[in-house]
Amino acid sequence: MLLPWEYGVRNLARRPIRTALTLIALATVITLVFVVVGFIRGLERSLAVSGDDAVVLVYSVNSEENVENSSIAAQIPGLLTASFDGAQARYGIQHVSPELYLGTRVREAGGKGGLGLVRGVTTAAPLVRRSVNVFEGEWPAAGEVLVGRLAAAKLGVESESLAVGKVIDFEGESWPISGRFAAGGAAFESEIWCRLSDFQTATKRQDLSMVALLLQPGRSSGEVELFCKERIDLELRAIGETAYYGLLQKHYRPVRMLAWTVVWLVSGAGVFTGLNMMYGAVAGRVREIATLQALGFRRVAILLSLIQEGVLLSAAGSLIAGFIALTMLNGMAIRFTMGAFTLRIDSVALLIGCGVGLSLGVLGALPPALKALKAEVAVCLKAV
């Protein structure tokens, strides 16, 4: 015969302080799990949505996967369009975007700032970077910049510092902000865009970092790769944008593995926390457990009742942590080496976080309950 369901619920209410402390500890542990899993999911999503299957990147073969170190001649875009007819064109405008991309020190009007990512572009950039959407302000005029919605997080400043009409400083010049853009969570959102010619003048460079081409339907990046291999004198490399960000995913694999390790460590710490709290709870109920056995309740029934209490606490802790994660953590901007991205508390993160929480309730309650049930009933009845 099992103990009534209400028995376990009433036991939690009989010790409100101990129950509250256990609940807070479990909710804190599960919230940490949500933070780490949200970090992993946000990084993976940012890299996954940054690539466009129809876009090919052409940059220096000597820069490997680091486009910031790439340097190619300014005439490469014209050479590509003259030699390769696979790029899309509309109304006589080639969908080819020459770009100068590098990291530089950026400061807002108050003097605060950090290392920012600046991309010099032409008016062809929105034709190639199809995910970019200017949601506030307008396209930059001469001497102005367009900032991504996560650029403030990358610089470590308040978002109000990069509002439309504000001024930022980099490369020894002041740049008024003409607008802000989003890119559906892509890596571009942590960048600052300005006119290519203005950026070349400010940096005293006439070269480019890369050329991005939007291919016609049915054309493949392999054709551009073949052109780069044939013109070995140009020392160019071509790669599909999706494949490029796939390489970055492999590059950040150790970071993701480290994050998963943190999840396991945090979960392990939570198990030990639960063990500690449950050992204390069971130690004070030795006579109660022995009395239940003397009344005829089987050990399995008592064990299930103790596990029920642990699961109820962990389920409540999971609900509290899930509410905090969805309302306060989801969408929080995180600064990273590649730029910035947002924590993503999606269905996978919720499943992992709540699964860890419920497992803490079972694993935390099981060992102390088994230890208490192994003791002799007569001895426990005499315990103080």
Image (spheres, grey):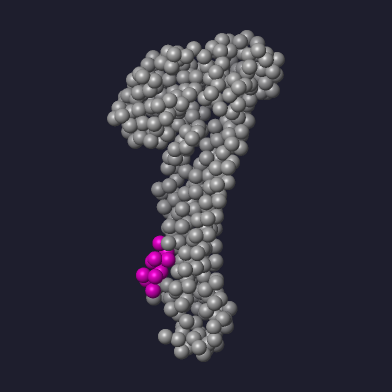
State yes or no: residue 234 in magenta. no
Residue 321 visible here:
yes
State yes or no: residue 16 in magenta. yes
Image position of 355 with respect to 150: above or below? below
Residue 181 visible here:
no
Q: Position of 308 compared to 154: left or right?
A: right
Could you tell me residue 339's position as x and y percent? 47, 33
Query: Looking at the image, which residue sits at the far front?
Result: 62
Residue in front for this viewpoint, 327 or 384: 384
Query: Looking at the image, which residue sits at the far left?
Result: 110
Could you tell me residue 61's position as x and y percent? 62, 21
From the image, which quarter does the C terminus lie in?
A: bottom left
Could you tell me residue 279's position as x and y percent? 48, 73
Residue stretch rendered in magenta on the structure: 15-24
**Secondary structure, magenta segment, majority class:** helix
Residue in front for this viewpoint, 122 or 369: 369
From the image, which quarter does the N terminus lie in?
A: bottom right
Q: Residue at x 39, y 20 (%)?
A: 171
Image position of 61 with respect to 258: above or below? above
Q: Position of 20 compared to 300: left or right?
A: left
Could you tell me residue 221's position as x and y percent? 66, 23
Residue in front for this viewpoint, 300 or 283: 283
Q: Residue at x 42, y 42 (%)?
A: 332
